[in-house]
Amino acid sequence: QCIISLAANHEAEKNLLEARLCLEQILTFTHYTDAIWTEPIGCKRQDLYLNQLVKASTKLSFYELRNQLKNIEIKLGRTMEDRQEGIVRLDLDILAYDDERHHLSDWERHYIKILLPQLSL
């Protein structure tokens, strides 16, 4: 089991849709939360972010999953130059893998706390 956060502040609706299509290739039993718009936190740009969570199963190891997520980000156009400018075409982070939490500071973010109850099945 894993929980992954999806976020984008550039062509966000399109990029999250494309990300979900890519995730369906590597995840099974996916359950997505609603996507919600949030204010940027500590960013150069003031573009709103579109955020969403997915809870799913995977046969990939943590490291294989992390590498696949980074490959999806690159496939959808994420570059170091954009990152330096505060443009986030897509950010995919593993918040939990099995019973282990990752990106611990993200768990305290307001939108995570709003979306997490939607993953209770």
Image (cartoon, helix red, strand yellow):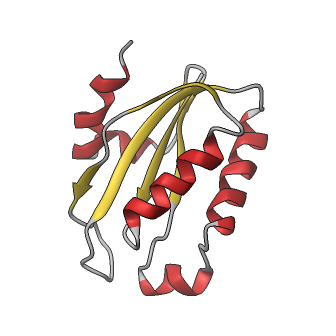
- Of the 4 image quadrants, the one containing the N terminus is top right
The quadrant in which residue 81 appears is: bottom right
Identify the residue at image location x=78%, y=42%.
64
Q: Is residue 35 shown left or right of residue 23? A: left
The relative height of residue 118 versus residue 50 in the rendered view (above or below) is above
Q: Residue furthest top?
A: 121
Number of callouts: 0
Q: Nearer the viewer, residue 96 or 6?
A: 6
Q: Position of residue 94 (x, y in %)?
A: 56, 41
Q: Position of residue 52 (x, y in %)?
A: 38, 45
Q: Nearer the viewer, residue 98 or 87?
A: 87
The relative height of residue 42 versus residue 99 in the rendered view (above or below) is below
The relative height of residue 75 versus residue 87 in the rendered view (above or below) is above
Q: Nearer the viewer, residue 11 or 89?
A: 11
Identify the residue at image location x=54%, y=46%.
20
The quadrant in which residue 40 appears is: bottom left
Identify the residue at image location x=41%, y=80%.
86
Q: Nearer the viewer, residue 19 or 115?
A: 19
Identify the residue at image location x=28%, y=23%.
117
- Of the 4 image quadrants, the one containing the C terminus is top left
